[in-house]
Image: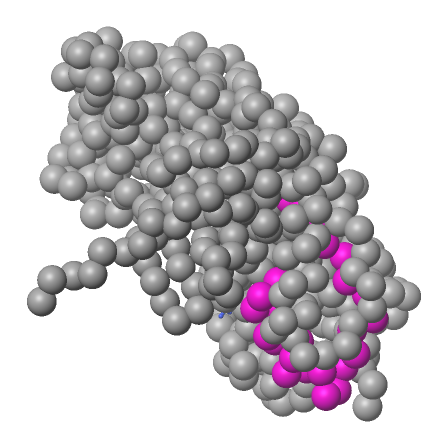
Amino acid sequence: MARRKKPLLERVEITAIGAEGKALGRVDDMVVFVPMLVPGDIVDIQVTRKRKNYMEGYVVKHHKYSGMRQEPVCSHFGICGGCKWQHLPYEKQLEFKQQQVVDNFTRIGKFSFPEIRPIIGSDNEYHYRNKLEYTFSNRRWLTEEEIGSGNDISSRNALGFHVPGMFDRVVDVEKCYLQDDVSNKIRNGIKDYALRNNLEFYDSKEHKGYLRTLVIRTSSEGELMVVLNMAYEDKKKGEKLLKYIRDSFPEMTSLMYVINPKLNDTFNDLDVKLFYGRDHIIDRMGDLKFRIGPKSFFQTNTQQAQKLYSVARDFAGLTGSNIVYDLYTGTGTIANFIAGKSRKVIGLESVPEAITDARLNAQINGITNTEFFSGDIKDLVDNEFIESHGRPDVIITDPPRAGMHESVVRAIMKASPEILVYVSCNPATQARDIAILAGKYEVTAIQPVDMFPQTHHVENVTLLRRTT
Ligand SMILES: C[S@@+](CC[C@H](N)C(=O)[O-])C[C@H]1O[C@@H](n2cnc3c(N)ncnc32)[C@H](O)[C@@H]1O
């Protein structure tokens, strides 16, 4: 049977930005989502997907560009998946993020809530990340102009970011605006060396090649870590390259490498070897120091993380005599951050290495009233745990995007803290979870925080108080 051709929609006005930052317009009571557009744009849209109450498509013709648009700063904008909102002024980005929280709380959560506080914006619109991971690839993304130019494009090596939705295509990054400029200097220097010395960039389809990924971590203390991933051990090539990196970038305080023969790029399960300097860097948040190893999770926007944690600490209303549980504690950042105002803080987290870091971070800061346990939260928090560690007066929870498992929500209700502070990077799952809690808790404050300018992501802190 012949497939029916999807419709072409003409002169559609984009009216809003919806869930997950997708721009949308309306045609005969149907919503149509199109990436990378801005309210006020008028476009023709080729529909690629049609469902009962929504469509998705791409732009085939622009009739009008919205007056809201601004010129993106980055030459890779539109191809690179990193900063999809550079064409929106920052104040508009904040407006849409605020609206995302309002929409999710209104539509998904059938509970009452007070007026949402104005989002806390980031002082830095760019250069705010303390970590970037670049990928080496021999399948560079080619622009249409490049293909049409007739120039020689036989060299397809690239070091940069994946094209969204294409695991094997990488944008060759010349300059990225998300991290301190030193990151560009180091990445471009290593790429030039690799090209000059004919080192093979990895082929993620064939699983061949030498150089795989490059992680650069910077810190507010001026320390800098480079972690280079190679697919196989080659003493001669490897040592020459690592020596070049060591001698070329004096800003670097830690140079580490991993031999990764696996099919994927993650190296959390592999041995990371030290070539030069220390095996960690130190970052600072307020009065606290954090020790960050090559595998450690640490919030990527340190300045905004401090603001986020301050909101969580204020919402918790700590008096110094509280027992606090910090669920999904990661490397114990929130737990250690609030320890000074608590009697005892218990941090729970599934990744054992993160728990090791959490304990170490408590130790280097002289904190003695935090305890950390690793395991799945849904198995950890039961009557026995609460009996042996004390009933929490306050629970702070910061789950991943998927939100909390329903059994964790039920366990929180059973533990019955007076105050629950819910930190979330996904207001949709947060609203879903709060809807379950609503019989026993009321929402008394909501504070969105922007951790990732130029993207649609929004962090949201909600304060819930027990009512029964
Ligand atoms: C959003 S991060 C929060 C990290 C930490 N609060 C911070 O600000 O640095 C979520 C954390 O939850 C952990 N996690 C995910 N699922 C889990 C589970 N089922 N049980 C325990 N921890 C889990 C992840 O490893 C991750 O460290």
Q: Residue at x 43, y 25 (%)?
A: 76
Residue 423 visible in the shown view: no
Residue 199 is drawn in which quadrant? top left
Q: Residue at x 87, y 70 (%)?
A: 321
Front residue of this view, candidates 78 and 12: 12
Residue 251 is drawn in which quadrant? top right
**Magenta residues?**
427-452
Image-quarter location of ligand 1: bottom right
Q: In the image, residue 363 lies at what x, y percent?
A: 67, 50
Q: Is residue 441 magenta?
A: yes
Q: Residue at x 46, y 44 (%)?
A: 11
Q: Is residue 166 magenta?
A: no
Image position of 295 with respect to 392: above or below: above
Front residue of this view, candidates 313 and 169: 169
Look at the image and name its color scheme. one colour
Image position of 420 with respect to 273: above or below: below
Figure quadrant of the C terminus: bottom right
Front residue of this view, candidates 34 and 61: 61
Q: How many marks?
A: 0
Front residue of this view, candidates 58 and 10: 10
Q: Residue at x 39, y 50 (%)?
A: 9
Q: In the image, residue 297 lies at what x, y percent?
A: 52, 48
Figure quadrant of the N terminus: bottom left
Image position of 465 with respect to 167: above or below: below
Q: In the image, residue 191 lies at what x, y percent?
A: 32, 17
Residue 141 visible in the shown view: yes
Q: In the image, residue 455 lies at what x, y percent?
A: 55, 42
Q: Residue furthest right?
A: 319
